Image: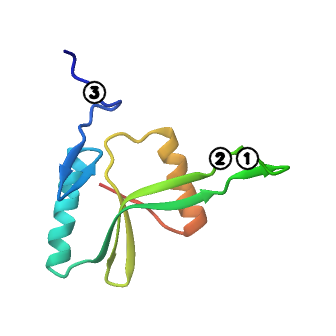
């Protein structure tokens, strides 16, 4: 039998009842949970969607689907909201979405 690999050779990992896209992402989640328990961060959320471009319709028919960025983690560190993405590969699609996040929401993504 052949072992199936993901496109970027990441391995899905289950931790704390959640399935993560990679071991790196699961490890970062474990770190953030420790920081949350220690009171360093609050409101940890996982897989938070941000609408970047709404769907486009002509005569009631969808001609272009919406463009959404899904942040790996979002949390509060003091008064700041931090949006994190655990990156192994910076694809052209990700770079465009990163720029749109800054333009639409004024949010700079923290890459781990």
Q: Which residue is mark 1?
A: 62
Q: Residues within 10 Å of mark 3 (few under 14, many from 20)?
A: few
Within 10 Å of disc 2 (Cα), the crowding (few <14, some 14-19, many 20+) is few
Residue 65 image label:
2
Q: Earlier in the sequence, mark 3 or mark 2?
A: 3
- Is tag 1's residue or tag 3's residue first in the polypeptide sequence? 3
Residue located at (25% from left, 44% from top): 22
Q: Residue at x 57, y 60 (%)?
A: 51
x then y, percent, for residue 37: 15, 77
Q: Marks 1 and 3, how far apart in space?
A: 34 Å
Q: Residue at x 60, y 65 (%)?
A: 104
Instruction: Assign a secondary structure to mark 3.
Output: loop
Q: Mark 3 highlights which residue?
A: 5
Picture coordinates of residue 54, whole percent (x, y) = 66, 57
- Check if mark 2's residue and mark 1's residue have beta carbons within 8 Å: yes
Q: Nearer the viewer, residue 23 or 107?
A: 23
């Amino acid at each position: 039998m052949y072992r199936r690999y993901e496109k970027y050779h990441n391995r899905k990992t289950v931790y704390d009842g959640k399935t993560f896209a990679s071991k790196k992402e699961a490890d970062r989640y474990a770190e953030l949970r420790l920081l949350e328990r220690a009171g360093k961060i609050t409101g940890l959320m996982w897989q938070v969607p941000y609408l970047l471009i709404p769907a486009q319709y002509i005569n009631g028919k969808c001609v272009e689907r919406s463009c959404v960025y899904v942040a790996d983690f979002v949390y509060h560190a003091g008064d700041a909201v931090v949006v994190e993405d655990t990156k192994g590969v910076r694809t052209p699609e990700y770079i465009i979405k990163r720029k749109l996040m800054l333009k639409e929401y004024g949010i700079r993504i923290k890459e781990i």
